Amino acid sequence: MPFSPLHLLLFIFLLGFLLAFVQIGIFTIAFDKLGLSPHSAMLLLFTSLFGSAINLPLFSVRAERPPEIPPVPPQIRGLLRQVMREFTGRTVIAVNVGGCLIPLFFSAYLLKHHPLPLDQVFLAVALVSGVCYTFSRPIPGMGIGMPVFVAPLTAALVALMINSEHSAPLAYISGTLGVLLGADILRLGDIRRMGVPLASIGGAGTFDGIFLTGIIAVLLA
């Protein structure tokens, strides 16, 4: 995954800025509502950030080549720009460590340490998943797209209505799992028509996808 020195410096600056936020800013409030210490919050943030660059392949499926689309300008591909893979007629289905596995493990941790009835959790996840599926759309040549604030707003509202006393952990769980189910797993049937070489569950990244949804939902709950 090659990247330029300038982008590396920007990435390091962004990482330092986000870690500082854990200590004194918005992330501290969110993680405190979830019962995490600043040290644990930094560990979660750090592993989620770097885990978002790791995709674990599961299997591949035949896919259709999409219509010709304009190339993505280099300046908006992100700080760590991965080499664009050539589409060969098959799409590799993978899971993203930072955007899928870590949120799943952390959701399991929250379920263990907070008295959340499973029926409430299932209901909240189902509602958020339905909204995410409705608002998400397959984008040929790129992946699944969805308005950024749909999931966190829905998760926060659902959590407050179902269990206001423990709305923060319920908002995180329903927000992250709702996106994974509604905008990723339930959209696997659309993968064949998108013409992408790699489709990663949770691969929207850490801060612009699953992780950000969980944090915003907790802040609003």
Image (tube, rainbow, N blue to C red):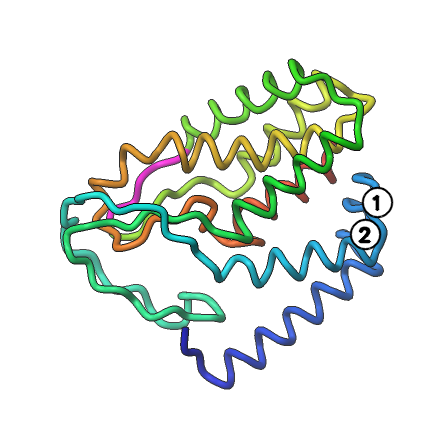
Left or right, 131 with respect to 46, comes to left
- Give the residues drawn in magenta, as a range: 136-140
- Disc 1 residue crowd, few under 14, some 14–19, many 20+, Cα 10 Å: some
Q: Which secondary structure class fits the magenta region best?
A: strand
Tell me the quadrant of the picture where the N terminus can be found.
Answer: bottom left
| Closer-to-camera residue (135/45) | 45
- What amino acid type should be assigned to the residue bearing mark 1? Asp
Residue drawn at (64%, 32%) of the image: 173
Tell me the quadrant of the picture where the C terminus can be found.
Answer: top right
Give the x, y percent position of residue 86. 21, 64
- Disc 2 residue crowd, few under 14, some 14–19, many 20+, Cα 10 Å: many
> Circle 2 is placed at which residue position?
28
- Vertical relation: 10 (above or below) 110: below
Residue that protrudes farthest toward the top in the picture: 119
- Vertical relation: 143 (above or below) 156: below
Left or right, 211 with respect to 18, comes to left
> Circle 1 is placed at which residue position?
32
Give the x, y percent position of residue 9. 58, 81
Residue drawn at (41%, 66%) of the image: 76
Give the x, y percent position of residue 107. 66, 36
Residue drawn at (62%, 76%) of the image: 12
Give the x, y percent position of residue 47. 64, 59
State how far apart marks 2 and 1 are (Cα). 6 Å
| Closer-to-camera residue (166/43) | 43
